[in-house]
C-alpha cells in the first residue's frame, strides 16, 4: 500500500492498516462458533441443533444492522463509530465466553453481531473518503486481505484452538484481539487528522457549508501526481441499497439455517 499523507501530516496507510486489523477481528467472529457447536452443546446440555441458534442469532444481527449504520456514520464520523463498535464488541465477546446458559450465549452473540456489523461497511466508506479513485483497487485488495484472513482464522480458531483450550477461551482470545484493535484505533484517531475525514460536513452548523468544505479539503488525501496536475479526488459512495441487499441476503441465509436446525431436533 502506497503511503499517503495530507498537508497536515496524516497518514492513510496506518489508518487503513488498523481498520484491516479490526475487520480481521470482526470477520473472525462470523464463523468462529460453527466448529464450536459440539463443545457448546455438551457444555450447555443441549443438542447441536439447539446450540446452532448462536450461529443464526449472530448472522441475523450482523446482517440487519447494516441497514441503519450509514446515516449514523455520516453524522458522527466513520472512524469514531468503528472505534465504538470495536469497544462494544470487546465487552460482548468477553460475555460470550462467560455465558453460563444457552439463552445467555444467544443474547451475547446477538449483541456481538449488532456491534461487529458496523466495522467492515464503515471501513469501506472511510476508505472511499480518503483514497483517490486511481489507487482504490490496490488499497481495497490490501484491506480485503484482512477480512479474508479473518474468516479463515475464525474457522480454524474454532476448530483447533477450541479443541486445545476449550470454546470459552476462543472467545476470550477474540475479545483480547478486539481490545487491542480498539486501543490502536483510539491512538490513531487522536494523532491522525485523516481519521476525521468525511466528518466535517456532517457536524458543521447549518449555513456554514464553506467552512465545512474547507475543513474537509484539508484532510482529504490526493494522489501525488494528481495533486501536481491540480486534479480533484473522486470519492466513492457506498449506496445504502447495497448494504440493504447484503443485509437481507444474510437474514435469508440465517432463516434457512434456523429452519434446518429446528428440523434436525
Image (cartoon, grey):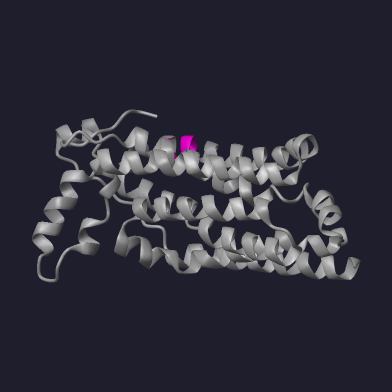
Q: How many marks?
A: 0
Point 38% across, 42% down: residue: 185
Q: Quadrant of the C terminus?
A: bottom right
Name the side, left or right, on which 3 lies relative to 169: left
- What span is colored magenta in the figure? 139-143
In front here: 14 or 191?
191
Q: Is residue 38 above or below residue 159?
A: below
Instruction: Indicate the position of residue 57 as horizontal and vertical percent values.
Output: 67, 65
The part of the image, by quadrant, that contains residue 184 is top left
Residue 259 is drawn in which quadrant?
Answer: bottom right
Residue 132, image x, y percentages: 30, 41
Residue 236 appearing in the image: no
Q: Nearer the viewer, residue 47 or 71?
A: 47
Q: Residue 134 falls in which quadrant of the image?
A: top left
Examine the structure image and report whether residue 44 is included in the region drawn in magenta: no
Judge from the rendering whether residue 42 lies leftward or rightward of residue 223; answer left or right: right
Position of residue 205 relative to residue 77, above or below, is below
Residue 150 appears at what percent x and percent y? 60, 40
Residue 179, placed above or below residue 100: above
Is residue 42 visible in the rendered structure shown here? yes
Q: The N terminus is located in which quarter?
A: top left
Amino acid at each position: 500500500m502506497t503511503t499517503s499523507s495530507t498537508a497536515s501530516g496524516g497518514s492513510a496507510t496506518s489508518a487503513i492498516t488498523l481498520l484491516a486489523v479490526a475487520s480481521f477481528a470482526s470477520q473472525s467472529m462470523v464463523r468462529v462458533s460453527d466448529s464450536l457447536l459440539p463443545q457448546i452443546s455438551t457444555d450447555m446440555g443441549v443438542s447441536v441443533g439447539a446450540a446452532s441458534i448462536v450461529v443464526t442469532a449472530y448472522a441475523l444481527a450482523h446482517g440487519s444492522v447494516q441497514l441503519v449504520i450509514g446515516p449514523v456514520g455520516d453524522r458522527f464520523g466513520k472512524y469514531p463509530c468503528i472505534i465504538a463498535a470495536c469497544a462494544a464488541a470487546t465487552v460482548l465477546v468477553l460475555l460470550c465466553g462467560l455465558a453460563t446458559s444457552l439463552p445467555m450465549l444467544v443474547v451475547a452473540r446477538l449483541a456481538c453481531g449488532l456491534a461487529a456489523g458496523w466495522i467492515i461497511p464503515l471501513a469501506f466508506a472511510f476508505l472511499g473518503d480518503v483514497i483517490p479513485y486511481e489507487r482504490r483497487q490496490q488499497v481495497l485488495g490490501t484491506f480485503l486481505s484482512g477480512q479474508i484472513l479473518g474468516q479463515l482464522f475464525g474457522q480454524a480458531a474454532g476448530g483447533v484452538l477450541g479443541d486445545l483450550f476449550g470454546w470459552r477461551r476462543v472467545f476470550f482470545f477474540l475479545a483480547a484481539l478486539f481490545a487491542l484493535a480498539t486501543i490502536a484505533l483510539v491512538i490513531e484517531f487522536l494523532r491522525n487528522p485523516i481519521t476525521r475525514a468525511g466528518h466535517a460536513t456532517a457536524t458543521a452548523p447549518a449555513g456554514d457549508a464553506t467552512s465545512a468544505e474547507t475543513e474537509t479539503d484539508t484532510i482529504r488525501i490526493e494522489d501525488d501526481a494528481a495533486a501536481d496536475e491540480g486534479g480533484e479526488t473522486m470519492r466513492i459512495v457506498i449506496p445504502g441499497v447495497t448494504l440493504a441487499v447484503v443485509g437481507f441476503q444474510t437474514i435469508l441465509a440465517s432463516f434457512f439455517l434456523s429452519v434446518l436446525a429446528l428440523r434436525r431436533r
